[in-house]
Image (cartoon, coloured by chain):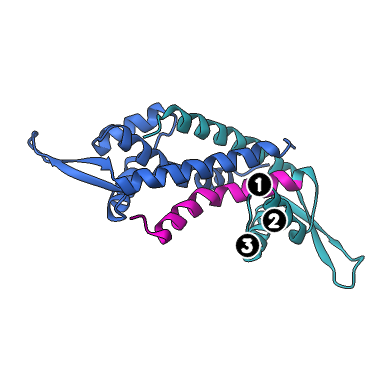
Chain colours: A cyan, B blue
Amino acid sequence: MLEPDLVAQHRQELRRGTTSLACLALLAQQPDYGYNLLSRLAGLGLATEANTLYPLLRRLDKQGLLTFEWDTSDARPRKVYATSADGIALVDLLRTDWNLLTDALNRMEKP
Amino acid sequence: MLEPDLVAQHRQELRRGTTSLACLALLAQQPDYGYNLLSRLAGLGLATEANTLYPLLRRLDKQGLLTFEWDTSDARPRKVYATSADGIALVDLLRTDWNLLTDALNRMEKP
């Protein structure tokens, strides 16, 4: 009997790298607030917790893959994130990797 | 300018979950020695270091996703790994996740 915790752990490992890739790709299409990005990810079937997403956005910003500007039009200033040129270059590389991995998985017969 | 270390880190995150999935799928098709599995992974474009693969096989065995038997036909006994019924069930689940992730990535326009 497969333990639910074990399944969750393996699914999370498979998801981890994808969430970064999805954020960079989405914020290259359209800069956005973290809060809106949560809905855009969920709309793609990549639902992510806010307490996973916000640290990830800060990490990608520190790594120079995202940039942000303050939107001060509201009472409380909010960060609007966009993917940097480096981030866009990384998206291209990771998409290529993803396609190679998908080809490899498809070449293995189903057990 | 994208730092090579940063690229390597993101590629590795994207790869990590895939290697477990590939091992389980390959050992469900055909039980094998770790050493042979290295070549089978490499043949699929999923080249993996021996010092990454061996601990992973021990972890998957501890998790009940692989089983092994000793092959004592050589001077030095060797483990022959096979995917367990739980491992096969997990491969099915993770393949479904992978396909959902691939669909999500494909629905995002290229930046």
The range drawn in magenta is: A1-27
Q: Nearer the viewer, residue A105 or B54?
A: A105
Give the label on residue B44, or none. none
Q: Which residue is mark 2?
A: A61
Name the residue furthest front: A1
Residue occupied by mark 1: A22
Return the chain for callout 1: A
| Residue A49 marker | 3
Tell me the element at label 2: helix
How far is the residue under mark 1 from the one under mark 3?
14 Å
What residue sits 74% from the left and 59% below the top?
A34
**Among numbered discs 1 and 3, the one appearing first in the sequence:** 1
Q: Is residue A5 above or below residue A88?
A: below
Query: Which chain hosts label 2?
Result: A
Tell me the subunit letter for badge 3: A
Question: Which type of secondary structure does the marked residue at label 3 adopt?
Answer: loop
Q: Nearer the viewer, mark 1 or mark 3?
A: 3
Residue kind at label 1, given as amino acid type: Ala
Residue type at mark 3 is Glu
Taking B94 as reference, is A35 left or right? right
**Pointer 1 local density, CA inside 10 Å: few below 14, some 14–19, many at least 20:** many
